[in-house]
Image (cartoon, coloured by chain):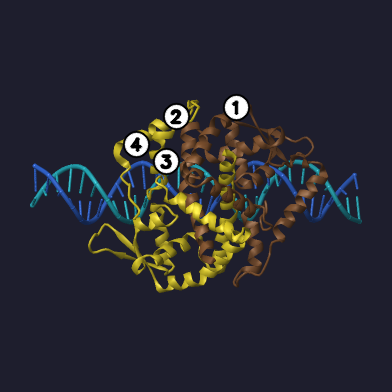
Chain colours: A yellow, B brown, C blue, D cyan
Amino acid sequence: MSDTDTTAWAALLRVHAAVVPVLDRTLQSACGLPLTWYDVLLELRHAPDGRLSMGELGERAVVSRTRVSRVVDQLVDAGLAARETNPDDRRSAHAAITDAGRQRLREAAPVYLDGIQRHFTGLMTPQEATVVARALEKVLRSPGRSAAGPLQKALERQGETAVVLPGDEKTAAGHEAAGRERRRAARGENRLRRETP
Amino acid sequence: MSDTDTTAWAALLRVHAAVVPVLDRTLQSACGLPLTWYDVLLELRHAPDGRLSMGELGERAVVSRTRVSRVVDQLVDAGLAARETNPDDRRSAHAAITDAGRQRLREAAPVYLDGIQRHFTGLMTPQEATVVARALEKVLRSPGRSAAGPLQKALERQGETAVVLPGDEKTAAGHEAAGRERRRAARGENRLRRETP
DNA sequence: CGTAGACATGTGCGTGCGCACACACTCCAA
DNA sequence: TTGGAGTGTGTGCGCACGCACATGTCTACG
């Protein structure tokens, strides 16, 4: 039923808008750790040796690839991460979590978890939470999901969906914009394609 | 289980980060309608007479209250909405959807719905979609949820949760919002109240 | 009737974010 | 060896967002 679809999507948007600022501020005032920092540090901690290249970090964390560079700068200033150069490939820069970073993460984790339970999963049944987790992860692992930035994904889809709509053809307005962007894609900038192992 | 909690939350963050830009760009290139515009127009359309005060609009739409003002300006420039003054209360400004706005919404709706199904609900089973919708709506309707901006909610928490792990809350936020609305209702403006038809 | 407080809204401003571009480096073929 | 294509990263810039404050208006109380 299409009503269920829009309801689910609208609810996701609103939950995100309502809960994210709460958790962000809670984490920031309690631990001095913005949500972005937490996310980046968490991904670093998950990685082997606590190190990750900028590209990998940008793909795994919620922040965009280009933004990672500045976030890591902030983390370095705060002493929570360190930059390392890769001798094998001097283009790539690695970010590594420091002991202080691990410590801050340990302090922040219970605060974060408590906030998640208090403002999110605690407001539904455990069964619902399980289904939500499973369903959303299926969305992430779907074939449409690519590690590239949102622009590329949009462009890839665009060729299929932009003009032709199921049972409707009033696409007058966005014609020129669509053409412009498709042209850029054809110029060969969708090289960010990658497989997630 | 706490693992389920963090998994569900992380998945929500990632789905949001992955899908929102796609839908935004699709909608924008196909219909010239940013997601924010769509959301605001949709709330206006749901409202009786297609009119809503700025405050109500900010509470119902995903955009913040202060941002609504500028978004409505853009919509007015685009001819999709109109500003109206309330003779009864000259503080409040109303935004009303125009015929052109309704038309654009009709054009955009199938595109949006298709995007939602293609990139979100279509990637899970209908049963899962139903559960996701129900669970997330329960989160929204929970007592901690207030129509006020995120800052207020966070600040109210802050006094209690600053350093230590939180005790309890869940009354303050909804309290003042309810009080405000009760006052407005007494003034005779509660005809804006709506149930999802 | 007049003043103080509450309230709805608009605006200046700083911040976070991502795209387009530039740069440095690697790899490969001629 | 050398030049060009491919790739990883950092940065200038503009845009969206939300908070603090200012403005105009209504309400309650003396």
- Closer to the camera in the image, A136 or A77: A136
Name the N-terminal-most of marks 4 and 3. 3
Q: Position of residue D15 (x, y in %)?
A: 49, 42
Mark 2 closeness class: few <14, some 14–19, many ≥20 residues within 10 Å:
some
**Chain of the residue displaying label 3:** A
Which residue is located at x 47 percent, y 63 percent? A38
Mark 3 closeness class: few <14, some 14–19, many ≥20 residues within 10 Å:
many
**Mark 3: secondary structure:** helix
Q: CA distance from mark 2 to mark 3?
A: 15 Å
Q: Is residue A96 above or below residue B10?
A: below
Q: CA distance from mark 3 to mark 1?
A: 27 Å
Quadrant hosting residue A180: top left
Which residue is located at x 39 percent, y 64 percent? A44
Check chain identity for marks 2 and 3: say if they share one. Answer: yes
Q: CA distance from mark 1 to mark 4?
A: 31 Å
Q: CA distance from mark 2 to mark 4?
A: 20 Å
Left or right: where does residue A163 sit relative to residue C7?
left
Q: Of circles 2 and 1, which is in front?
A: 2
Kindly identify which residue carries mark 4: A184
What type is the residue that disc 1 sits on?
Answer: Ala
Task: Return the mark for residue A154.
Answer: 3
Kindly identify which residue carries mark 2: A164
Task: Return the mark for residue B100.
Answer: 1
Name the N-terminal-most of marks 2 and 4. 2
Name the N-terminal-most of marks 2 and 3. 3
- Closer to the camera in the image, C23 or A163: A163
**Chain of the residue displaying label 2:** A
Mark 4 closeness class: few <14, some 14–19, many ≥20 residues within 10 Å:
few
Residue A76 visible at all: no
Check chain identity for marks 4 and 3: say if they share one. Answer: yes
Q: CA distance from mark 2 to mark 1?
A: 22 Å
